[in-house]
Amino acid sequence: RREDDIESSSLLKGNDPNNNQLSRTAMSLEPSEVDVKPDAPNSGSISSTGLKVLALLAVQNASKNLIMRFAVQSKPDFLYSAAVIGSESTKLLLSTLYILFYERKPFSSILTFLRVDKSNALLLTVPATVYNIQQTLEYVALSNIDASVFSVLVQTKLVATAVFAVGILGRHLTKIQALSLGLLTVGVMLCNIKPEACVESNEEGGSNNFVGILATLGIALSSGFASVYTEKVIKKKKREENRRGYSLAYMQVQLAGVSLVIIGVWAIGKDFASIASHGLFHNFNFAAFVSVLTSALGGLTVAAVLKYADAVLKGYATAISVVLTGVFSMVIFGTELNVFYGLGMINVICSLVMYSGKNLYDNFV
């Protein structure tokens, strides 16, 4: 999930000013990944704007999981590749319209940007491919496990990022980060303890918990890899001169275009027979279209407000979204949340706050 990949990796870096280059370059990967300094000075408190952004991020994270779960819980027979194509096409269209009608710049400016920054587009093929895989796995996961379990289990991306960062980049975890990852692991294990009756009920409904958990862990693993790849490879390529004068919308167009090429090739190779016989969006129901639109709009909205949020605030937002997803999953889908889930959720929330808490580093490094 591009919203989180860079954030997870950047939290391992400490306060090294040289890491700002990665944050700026990572804008091309996903604007909502970048740890941008908030407009207001960091006084240890959250401003009114920060509170609004906190609420927005939390609601967006929770609503995306819940809506996607609603769309696929009955296992409708539509192509997941079509859903990814729909999401990326929506991002491409909206970003283009933003440039043309809000920024009032000609369409030729987009072509100029793509031409001068084409070498960076080649580097984006790897993270774009990984992100397409993540989006597909989200549909697989949420068609087999509850949104409440998914929202907790997917946080293992922090563990994956830490492992890749330590093994490939030679990073060192602080004591507080190591402790938070331990809490996260315990929390995830607790949340996946379910009464046998619940497991049997899921299997009778056509769901496979093992497949859902495996898909979610695949998302976490690919997220960690994308973070480290971005720092290892893209960070070394300095193209800031090419991007001066261009807004974030241009980079969204670039990334969406690369993603569409990759998922298009995948769809032709894997689903060509079905597309030729029934069309790309065959069996796409209203819930599926809403899921695609929410995914696209959510990513763009978060990118637009990210300059008001730092890593700490995003950590709080993720923790709140875990709670919201659990509560609304119980209300909307009738998900049974036992005491193990409650204990696990507390562990996960504490680990997210600890992992993101910059002020804690000073006492535990």
Image (cartoon, grey):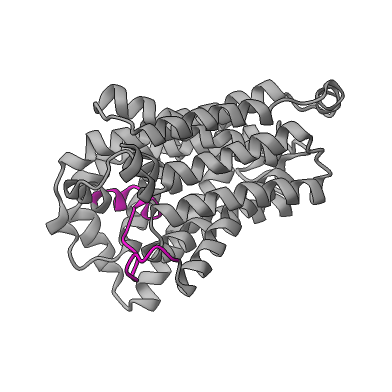
Q: Is residue 70 visible?
A: yes
Q: Is residue 28 left or right of residue 304?
A: left
View extreme (front): residue: 363
Q: Is residue 33 left or right of residue 270?
A: left
Q: Nearer the viewer, residue 206 or 346?
A: 346
Q: Is residue 355 above or below residue 86?
A: above
Q: Which residue is found at the position 60% from the left and 43% from the top? A: 280
Q: Which residue is found at the position 17% from the left and 64% from the top? A: 244
Picture coordinates of residue 64 (x, y %)? 61, 51
Picture coordinates of residue 50 (x, y %)? 46, 67
Q: Which residue is found at the position 67% from the left and 48% from the top? A: 325
- Tally the numbered discs: 0
Q: Is residue 283 visible?
A: no
Picture coordinates of residue 41 (x, y %)? 32, 69
Picture coordinates of residue 323 (x, y %)? 66, 49
Q: Which residues are magenta?
A: 25-45
Q: Is residue 362 above or below residue 191?
A: below
Q: Main secondary structure of the magenta part?
A: loop
Q: Nearer the viewer, residue 362 or 101?
A: 362
Magenta-drawn stretch contains 40 = yes
